[in-house]
Image: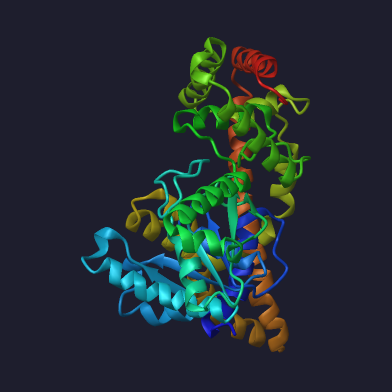
Amino acid sequence: MMRFFYIILFFSLRIATRLYFRKRAVYNAPKEFYGRTIYVSNHAASFMDPLLVALFRRPIVFFMTRSDIFTPLLKPVLWAAHMLPIYRQHDGEDTKNKNEEVFKTCSRILSFGRNLLIFGEGFTDDVFIRRLKPVKKGAVRIGFIALEDMNWKKKVYIAAVGCNYSDPNKMRSDILISTSDKICLNDYKEAFQENPSKVINELTKKIEKLMQEQITHVADKNWTSFHENVMQLTRKGMNADNYNPKLSLYSKWRYSQSLANWMNAEKLDNSPEILDLKSELEGYFNLLKRFKLKEKYVYDFQSENKGSRFKELLFLLTLWPFMLIGLIHCYIPYILVKRFTEKSFKRKVFWGSVKMLLGKVFMGIFNIPFIFLFYHFVYPSYWLSLAYYFFFIPSCGLIAYIYFMKLKDYKTKGIIQKMDLSKIISKRQALLEKIHLLLPNT
């Protein structure tokens, strides 16, 4: 059975995440709630990863979470949310013994047919980056400990999960979650009993390879910006700002992967043409930064649209009443949460998930009085009042957020219309031609 707080989070956060992400997709999703499976995921976006893997996939999971957040105050809440502590070397001298106790708990969870979610990399980069760090052996080790505790009488599986974001810290970005086929650890019984260390190492490498296949993995960290810049200009990949809206999220994910796989296979540092292209791309985006421009505006002025502001104006004129309602209900909690998060969390990788969680809580509390105000001053029906609270307020809040983004676009385009972009557009076109010439499938 799911614990009570897990159930509350499961249903309530689905609304928040659907508002936060513009598009969501799940590839090769497991169909069962239970399954005695250890899911090993990448850890690209801190708190956001466990939320999404649990919310958008059917399996009920118990999370392995860093031990330092298990304070006396939070421990009961975290327990109720299916979270288990994992102790790292700098967490204390008794790390090994404490982890052995946690591993025993994991064995019991698996023996009852439940699933575990483990983040194989162990930590999140300070800045979101499309690559997988080396995977640790803990997940495979936990699986074999569980099998030994069960005398190998039940089957235990392990599978890789990939969280693919266009940008986890940007509201109205995209997320695609991919899951590999399962590996049955029981199939390795004889080899494990003969040489445990060898089997654990080999399976960890296999899981790492499967995890790389579920995400966009740029092997060389120095080339991640090149990968992102190419995606922005071609508009075919998973970039949050520059993309082709006609392409499916799946096709954008596959393009992002294929570009990264080609880069990993090539010796890019030995190619003068690619090195020149990398330098020119960096120069182009630095030029945009200097003029306080964004690539999406340059594209818009280069396309048939010619920088037209009609769509923005239509949106602003049509939806301003809903924007005002959203502003009344959501502006104060939004500002408070934004300021608190950006002041309290120095690492930006935490911002998106913390803002989404705290925003949901504070906006929910802030708007409770409106249930009764609606009942007494609009229409005496608590069913309608609750519908207003749970559906209309969040929708208007989202409209208000998009409204101000559109207003910003409208003003910026007005300024750009007075600028001469011909040289920048020519530079962009020359870069695109070079990309099509040197890179495959672009």
Q: Quadrant of the N terminus?
A: bottom right
Up-down relation of residue 6 to residue 293 (above or below): below
Is 32 or 424 nearer to us in this picture?
32
| Residue 40: percent from left, percent from top | 53, 58
Q: Quadrant of residue 97?
A: bottom left
Residue 355 visible in image: no
| Residue 130: percent from left, percent from top | 53, 41
How many numbered badges does the structure rendering display?
0
Is 164 or 403 nearer to us in this picture?
164
In this image, 182 relative to 220: left or right?
right
In this image, 72 relative to 388: left or right?
left
Up-down relation of residue 265 to residue 192 (above or below): above
Q: Residue at x 47, y 81 (%)?
A: 80
Residue 360 visible in image: yes
Q: Quadrant of residue 76?
A: bottom left
Q: Quadrant of the C terminus?
A: top right
Q: Residue at x 63, y 75 (%)?
A: 11
Is 209 or 339 nearer to us in this picture?
209
